[in-house]
Structure formats: C-alpha cells, structure tokens
Amino acid sequence: MKATYDFVVIGAGVFGAWTAHCLRRRGASVALLDAYGPASSRASSGGETRVIRMGYGPDELYTRWSARSLPLWKEFAQRANVQLFHQTGVLWLSHDTDAYTRQLLDVLIRSNIRCEKLSADEVRRRYPQLSFADVTWAVLEPESGVLLARQAVQAVVKDAISSGVDFSLASILSPSGTGRLDSIRSSSGESFSAGTFIFACGPWLPKLFPVLLADRLRPTRQEVFFLGPPPGSDAFRPPRMPVWLHSIHPLRPYALPDLENRGFKIAFDRHGPDFDPDSGSRVVPPQSVAELRDYLHDHIPSLHDAPVIETRVCQYENTYNGDFLIDRHPGLENVWLVGGGSGHGFKHGPALGEYLTGLLLDHAAAEPRFSLASKHTTPKRAIF
Ligand SMILES: Cc1cc2nc3c(=O)[nH]c(=O)nc-3n(C[C@H](O)[C@H](O)[C@H](O)COP(=O)(O)OP(=O)(O)OC[C@H]3O[C@@H](n4cnc5c(N)ncnc54)[C@H](O)[C@@H]3O)c2cc1C
C-alpha cells in the first residue's frame, strides 16, 4: 500500500471495478477497497449473469451507453482471454398499444443498431416453447446477449491489480466533516489517503451517507429463479432461446437462456420490498415459487413443473426514476458518489468507467441526469 494515492475507489462491484481500471489505464495511482471482496454474493454485481441490450424505449442516452459498453466488454474479454459475453440475442415482446417498444425500435434504427421486427406468427414459429397470447409483434436485437457478471467483475479487478491497482479487503467507515477529506478509515483501523475518494458502494450508499441518500436511493429485494429444463433438451439454450423481455405483462417477466448448464433463468422486474444488503434474508418463500408457476403455466407450459434448481435474492439500488447517480459530494469536495444502477446498471460498467475518468482527469462536461440535485425522493420509475 502506498502512503497516498491519486484515487481510492471504495466498492469493487461493476461500477468501482471499471472506474479503477479506467483510471489506472490513464496512469493514475489507484487503490480499490471492498468490504466483502469483488462481486461478492451480497453485491448487486454478484449474480451469475446480466443482460446487455441496446433498447431503452425512447431513452437514447442509455442506448448510447450500451452501444459503447458492448465493444468494450468484448475487447476486455478478448484481452483477458476469457469468455464473458454470450451473443444470445435479445427479444422484446410487444403489443399494438406498447409505445415503449415502438420508440425503442425507432431509436435502434436511428442509431444503426442491428434489429429485426418480428410478427407474432414469426415469434411462434421461431420459439414454439413459448406461448404469448398478448404479443402481436416483437423486436429482436441479434447482437445483444448476456454478460457473465460475477466472473466479468472479478476479471476486471484481476486485470486492474496486474496493471498496478492495489486491492484491499476493507470495510470503510462513513467519512465525516466538510471541505477536503485527507483519509478514510476502515472498521479495523487502517487508514487510506488519496487526492480523491470515489464511493461506488451500490446499495450500501444510503448507509454510508444517510443524511444525503437515505431518501434518494432505495435498495429493493429482487428474486431470481433457475429452472431445470428436461434432460437432453436444447429448447432453452442458445441458439434456440434468446434473452426475452415480456415487459407488457404486469409482472414484467424477463428470462435468460440456460448458459453454462446452470438452468433457465427467469425473474420479475417489478420492485420488491426494501432490503438490507448486509443482513437481508436471501431465502425465497414458497409463495414466490407459486406465483412463478402460474406464469409458467400460461407462457412456458413445458416448464410449468420444472424443478427450481437454484434461487437467488439480489437487490436493485433504485434512484427515484432509474437514472444513475454520478456526482461530487456537496459537502466534501474530493468525494464522489457513484451508484443508482437501478436494476439496469451492470451492462454500462465500461461506459461509466470511461465517463467518470473523463470528468476526473479531463474535466469533461457532466450529464445533468446523473447529478445529485436531479434525484427526487418520491419514486417515479421512468428508466426500464
Ligand atoms: C436481480 C438483478 C438483476 C439485474 N439484471 C440486470 C441486467 O440484466 N442487466 C444490467 O445491466 N443490470 C442488471 N442489474 C443491475 C446491476 O446488477 C447493478 O446495477 C450493478 O451491478 C450495480 O453495481 P455497483 O457496482 O453499483 O454495486 P455493487 O455490485 O453492489 O457493488 C458495491 C460494492 O461496494 C462494496 N461496499 C459497500 N460498502 C462498503 C464499505 N463501507 N467499504 C468497502 N466496500 C463497500 C460492496 O461490498 C460491493 O462489492 C440487475 C440487478 C439485480 C439485483
């Protein structure tokens, strides 16, 4: 450990890992700290898989960030010589009054992102395992897919360490005072000094900065299921099964194909109850499985009775509308707050690392949507 660093990044989830990586590649001295280790099972980035899709309804900003991030993920994976991305395709299921998917298609076309418009008949023909009576058309993003989340973050951290980032397992205490912060302390009494401190602590940010963030960042409990397809069947693996999003359904279901023989992954993208990332229970109750089986009965009949071979409970860290938080602390001039992934942040790790590095090293212009001032306290989800 050095006496002092240019940057100390607290939090080795996807946002902190890519930030440390990008700063180090620009020559800065960087320490990266995490209380539980990179992409631990408690972290939002700790899941096996995360979707990377380009479509964001009418929202061009996140489409641009996804389109920037995908080649950076691929380049990184190639350099690290690991498979971190599966090009499964991403299918948006829609109906005639769904403005979100119509606008998404317009943005993809305008942005020159490859996509196909499919009729309901074509969806039925290509994916006979699925049954969507409410779907009248769909959009397929053939070049999008799935990132192996935990492995990807751990690979980024490993690469950062080999390029000179110092990593420590340390639980950092809330900083206090105003003006300039010289050092931070861990729960075991270690001190870390730097010119700038970046708190990329995901769902822990409201605990570290309660006065500022307790009302502005809300961690919610999210359940994920892995189902066991029938033996010998490839119906739920690529290329027969893409990622699909059935967002026109009230439960907002989405599913990922069976990758690495882990099972067919399915979850509901509605916000769950408030959740504590340190101590919240990660056991899924039987009512949740029963609700899932109802959905399967109607939409994936061949998996209606499939065994649940794994469950996970993770947390979203929601801002009021889903926009990220990337801003300077209003009372501590050399402290930055980075988070608010809001259930869609993973894919954007590379673009976020680049963006924040631009702000810190090149005084690039800040995006107003990421400011603390723009974060209201009453939930009004707008980014899906
Ligand atoms: C079920 C689920 C499905 C999702 N699906 C998708 C998807 O398909 N596509 C997508 O793009 N996104 C998805 N997301 C969202 C995405 O996973 C998150 O937005 C992203 O992982 C957030 O990363 P982060 O680095 O901000 O936070 P985290 O990954 O939680 O990292 C924060 C880190 O800070 C550390 N930390 C906290 N406090 C301290 C402290 N005091 N001292 C030291 N270290 C500390 C923690 O240990 C942790 O490692 C999903 C999220 C969930 C939960």
Image: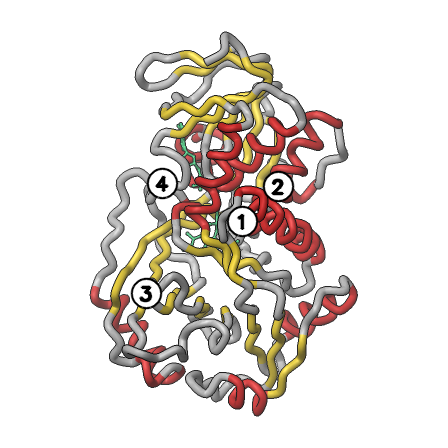
Label 3, label 4: how far apart the Cα atoms are: 19 Å
At 52% from the left edge and 56% from the top edge, which residue is drawn? Answer: 85
Q: Does residue 216 appear in this view?
A: no
Q: Position of residue 28 (x, y in %)?
A: 63, 21
Q: Give the quadrant of the N terminus.
A: top left
> Which residue is disc 1 drawn over?
345
Of 342 and 358, nearer the camera is: 358
> Which residue is disc 3 drawn over?
226
Above/below status of 370 relative to 364: below
Label 1, label 3: how far apart the Cα atoms are: 21 Å
Q: Does residue 141 appear in this view?
A: yes
At 42% from the left edge and 22% from the top edge, which residue is drawn? Answer: 174
Amino acid beneath label 3 = Phe
Of 245 and 73, nearer the camera is: 73
Amino acid beneath label 1 = Gly
The tag earlier along the polypeptide, 1 or 3, is: 3
Q: Residues within 10 Å of mark 1 (few under 14, many from 20)?
A: many
The tag earlier along the polypeptide, 2 or 3, is: 3
Of 381 and 57, nearer the camera is: 57
The answer to whether marks 1 and 2 mark residues whose Cβ atoms lie closer than 8 Å is: yes
> Which residue is disc 4 drawn over?
40
